[in-house]
Amino acid sequence: MSRMCQLTGRGTASGNARSHSNIATRRKFKINLQAKRIGGVKLRVSARALRTLAKVTN
């Protein structure tokens, strides 16, 4: 199962890890996935998408 939000399509992003001497090495920014039941269907949704859903439904 891929590390991707099933609602928005956001996935793992890549960037640089910067050391104290400013040397760049590649790293991954993994998405914060949560298993939630939305409309009777179990989805793996990012925490940011859940916050947006809470804002829209209120």
Image (cartoon, helix red, strand yellow):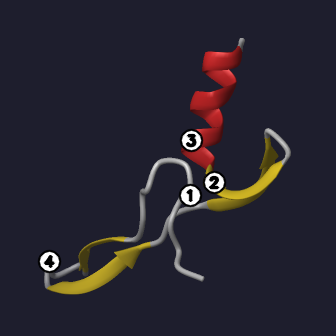
Which residue shows up at 14% across the image and 85% down it?
23
Q: Which mark is residue 6?
A: 1
**Mark 4 lies on residue:** 22
Earlier-in-chain disc, 2 versus 4: 4
Q: CA distance from mark 1 to mark 4?
A: 36 Å
Residue 56 falls in which quadrant of the image?
top right
Q: Position of residue 17 (x, y in %)?
A: 27, 78
Q: Which mark is residue 46?
A: none
Q: Position of residue 6 (x, y in %)?
A: 56, 58
Q: CA distance from mark 4 to mark 3?
A: 33 Å
Q: Are marks 2 and 1 in contact (CB under 8 Å)?
A: yes
- Which residue is the extreme one toward the front? 40
Q: CA distance from mark 3 to mark 1?
A: 10 Å
Element marked by disc 1: loop
Q: Amino acid under label 1?
A: Gln
- Which residue is the extreme one toward the top? 58
Which residue shows up at 71% across the image and 57% down it?
43
Please tell me whether residue 24 is drawn above or below residue 9 in the rendered image: below
Element marked by disc 2: strand
Q: Is residue 26 left or right of 41 when viewed as pictured? A: left
Crowd around label 4: few <14 · some 14–19 · many ≥20 (10 Å) = few
Earlier-in-chain disc, 2 versus 1: 1
Crowd around label 2: few <14 · some 14–19 · many ≥20 (10 Å) = many
Earlier-in-chain disc, 3 versus 1: 1
Crowd around label 3: few <14 · some 14–19 · many ≥20 (10 Å) = some
**Mark 2 lies on residue:** 45
Q: Are marks 1 and 4 in contact (CB under 8 Å)?
A: no
**Mark 3 lies on residue:** 49
Q: Are marks 3 and 2 in contact (CB under 8 Å)?
A: yes
Q: Are marks 2 and 4 in contact (CB under 8 Å)?
A: no
Q: CA distance from mark 2 to mark 1?
A: 6 Å
